[in-house]
Image (cartoon, rainbow, N blue to C red):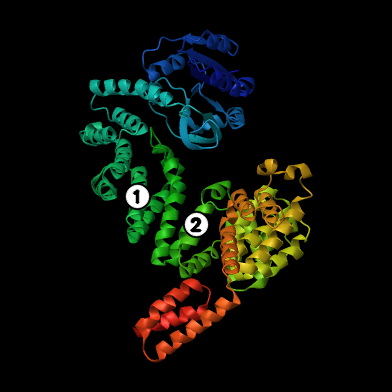
Amino acid sequence: MSMKLTISILLSDRYNTIEKCLESIVPLLQQVPCELILTITGKDPKVRELAQQYTDHIINYKWIDDFADARNQGLKEAKGEWFLFLDDDEWFEDVTPLIQFFNSGEYQAYNGAIHRVRNYVDWKGKEYYESHSTRLAKIRSDLRFEGKVHEHYNSIFLPVKELDIFVHHYGYVQKKREIGSQKVSRNLPLLLDMVEKNPNNQGTLVQLVQEYANIQDLEKAELYCYKGLELNSQYRDVQNDGWLYWMLTKVVFSRHGVNQAIQIAADALKTGRLNEAGKMQLYGMLVTFYAVVKEYKNVIDSLEQYLFYYEQFYNNPVLRQEQTRGLVVVDEIMRMKETVCYQGIQAALFLEQAEKIVMYLKEFSWNTPKMLYSYYNSFSSLMNSISKEKRELFQECFLKVNSEDEFILLQQMLYAHRKKKKDEVFIYYHKLKNSKDTRVRLYLIWLAGTYEYKIQKIVQTMSMDEWQLLLIELLKLVEVEEYGTYCRVMKDLLGEESAYYRQLQFRFLEQDMLDRQMSGDELKKLLDYYTEQICDYYNIIYRKEMLKEEYRYLLHPEYAFSLYYQEAWKEGFDQITSLKKAKDAYPRMLVVIKRLMEHLLREYDRVHSSITPEFQQLGEQVKEQVRQMMQIGQYETALPIVSQLVQLMPNDLEVLRLKQNILLHM
């Protein structure tokens, strides 16, 4: 049986990731005729011990600051028909597609294969970006690695297979600042030495620009972009030119502003030597730049050009493979499509070009997890930021997108609601009622207040924490004057004793007191009712000893608030102190308590500033004298008298009216 595959890995001293890397290829070693070559570049004896468990073919390599040379050691000793190289800080998620590629015989129809590299930016593995890499190649006599840094095959002949497989790569995670600087200090001297020895090597200049960009030394990145683009044509390559122009526009945008970046991109497209990938990349950048300066027609024109080249690559996989080389990966440029189409939608909305909006909406990968996490929030924010007329235009455009995507269906449902098409609303409700998306659930629960369809099953799949967060957004949708009606409908739909309804009731009562600027006796009455309901609900949840003041910081804040509030009206408690504690326990109600305390102080002043009947009678006599003075025009004499009377009788509105009339006649 012939050896189909050689797997070659450089091993440094990263023991933990090396073990994961080697374990991930064990199924390949088990199921495909292949060999494993491990080239040791580090010094840790534990790494050698680990390597010996997986293969006897170990190369001891003295590091000479040349990654290509190290890779070529394994390639020279390879016995397989194909060659696969890996880094020791990456590992496959699942090699099944790779096993099938070889065991099915499919590999015989290709000369190379691409897989994805998932580059993580944090140790938790939640944030990452993906790149494509050609690590798998059919071995030929002239195949070798080039480049002391960012080594790569000297060439790969078409056709190339794109495998649905990826490796996890944590090499770019900078847990400590020193990690990044170590990589830079390793790569930059090597590249600068290469440039000094061969200043006309545009590929090395490209790598140097990449390194300076990685460490945000944009001045040096710009300098070497120009050096690469100013070489004589015999030393330049259209692939590198396109990448350098793209990087130059990004750097210039950051350093000198959007207008200079636009000029460079436009000039490159007019006079530069660019292939399709380079043109598509620059048109994508121009979409963003023109959006920044709000030149919306130019946004549309640039986007049309980007999509023109996108279609060429989409319909011609061979062209896509031909123009994927080095740092230029056509698939990555194609993945810009949704980002630039979103900017195109913004421009088309401003220009009110409905046909363009629909066209760009159809370019999105609706009904995929990518949409859920990348663009739903963006579209929602855009919807909320535009005028009512443009919002209606936007939703009409969604009607023309044929998709069962939940966001699309939701927009269509909201449009039907706005047009009062009850039957259509119910159709969309039945399509969406099993959705797990919080946004969809929010609007279904909101519209239930109008259409009274069943929502118990929707709500009961949510945790109480999720429900509390949803209520915050729900309060923004329900109009103030609809609070009472909405809560009555929810009581019927959820059940009066349901914890979900009770929490909804509490939040709406709170918001009612805040939104309607209540004060006086009306506020006191609603606060009494609210705190009674709160205590009734939480009394069955907490043990009595938890109600002691020293433990109240552990309670739900609205419960602690209610306990302090109710104590404020009990004998033996200082009312003002208790209300201040209530306010501190639940800051959401701070404004409400402030209004109540102002009311109480006014009542206190009114009661304690009440005057005796004798004084009241004297005051009436003085007011009569003032009125007589006013009748004969003695306003200047009357003013000091009535001003003093205001001080003595501050709550007497007639005195205030007299003073105003005197001032008007003076």
Secondary structure of residue under mark 1: helix
> Can you tell which quarter of the image residue 98 is in?
top right
Mark drawn on residue 214: none
Q: Secondary structure at mark 2?
A: helix
Q: Position of residue 485 (x, y in %)?
A: 68, 70
Residue 541 percent location from the top left of the image: 77, 47
Mark 1 Cα within 10 Å, few/some/many (few <14, many 20+)?
many
Residue type of the residue flagged with mark 2: Ser
- Mark positioned earlier in the residue sequence (1 or 2): 1
Query: What crowding class fits label 2: few (fewer than 14 Cα within 10 Å), some (14-19), or many (20 or more)?
Result: few
Callout 1 amino acid: Tyr
Residue 490 picture quarter: bottom right
Disc 2 target residue: 381
Q: Out of 528 and 217, give the one closest to the viewer.
A: 528
Residue that carries the numbered disc 1 in the rendered image: 283
List x then y, in percent, for residue 514: 58, 62
